[in-house]
């Protein structure tokens, strides 16, 4: 199950975009389980970033794997983790990068899902692997720049 919680004012298509992107990412990795996705604004994600990462500024996406640090394909209760996305960052980055809101929101959702599944980008090798996988998932879904 993919639970989407809209805490901020969002375009009508927001929930459908998130559900499709999350389903695509989880399916591409053969992962089974539940996730929740909170859509908030810059103030909401800034508070989360400050409280959980000690970084006092807004960010685009945060991920909270249920089994932090372990590679996992499913956990005993089926809950994989939580994702928080700033709708403000998604809109601004879509404009900044010159692509659609759908593309940016899908990218952020896939990125968050991959973090929940154990992927990271702390070094060049991890970054290349994770970003190539993100691009493949989005391209396979027909979501291009």
Image: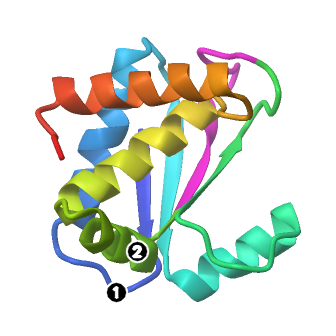
Q: Position of residue 132 (x, y in %)?
A: 41, 23
Q: Residues within 10 Å of mark 1 (few under 14, many from 20)?
A: few
When the figure is inspected, residue 36 is found, relative to residue 27, above or below; the finding is below
Foreground residue among 93 and 45 = 93
The numbered mark at residue 9 is 1
Residue depicted at x 43% and y 11%: 30
Residue depicted at x 23% and y 52%: 103
The secondary structure type at the circle numbered 2 is helix
Does the magenta-highlighted stretch encompass residue 109? no
The numbered mark at residue 40 is none
Closest to the camera, between mark 2 and mark 1, is 2
Quarter occupied by residue 24: top left
Q: Position of residue 97 (x, y in %)?
A: 29, 62
When the figure is inspected, residue 74 is found, relative to residue 65, above or below; the finding is above
The numbered mark at residue 87 is 2
CA distance for labels 2 and 1: 8 Å
Q: Is residue 47 left or right of residue 84?
A: right
Q: Specify the segment rendered in magenta.
A: 71-84
The secondary structure type at the circle numbered 1 is loop
Residue depicted at x 46% and y 30%: 131
User: Contact (CB < 8 A) between labels 2 and 1?
Assistant: yes
**How was the colour assigned to the protein in this rendering?**
rainbow
Q: Is residue 18 visible?
A: no
Disc nearer the start of the sequence (2/1):
1
When the figure is inspected, residue 1 is found, relative to residue 55, above or below; the finding is above
């Amino acid at each position: 199950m993919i639970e989407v919680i809209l805490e901020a004012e969002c375009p009508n298509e927001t929930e459908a975009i998130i559900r499709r992107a999350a389903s695509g990412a989880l399916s591409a990795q053969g992962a089974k389980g539940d996730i929740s996705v909170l859509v908030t604004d810059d103030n909401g994600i800034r508070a989360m970033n400050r409280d959980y990462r000690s970084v006092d500024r807004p960010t685009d996406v945060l991920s909270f794997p249920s089994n932090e640090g372990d590679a996992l394909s499913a956990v005993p209760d089926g809950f994989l983790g939580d994702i928080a996305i700033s709708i403000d960052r998604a809109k601004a980055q879509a404009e900044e990068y010159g692509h659609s809101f759908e593309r940016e929101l899908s990218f952020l959702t896939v990125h968050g899902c991959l973090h929940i599944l154990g992927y990271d980008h702390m070094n060049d090798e991890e970054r290349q692997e994770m970003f190539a996988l993100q691009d493949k998932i989005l391209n396979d879904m027909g979501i291009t720049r």
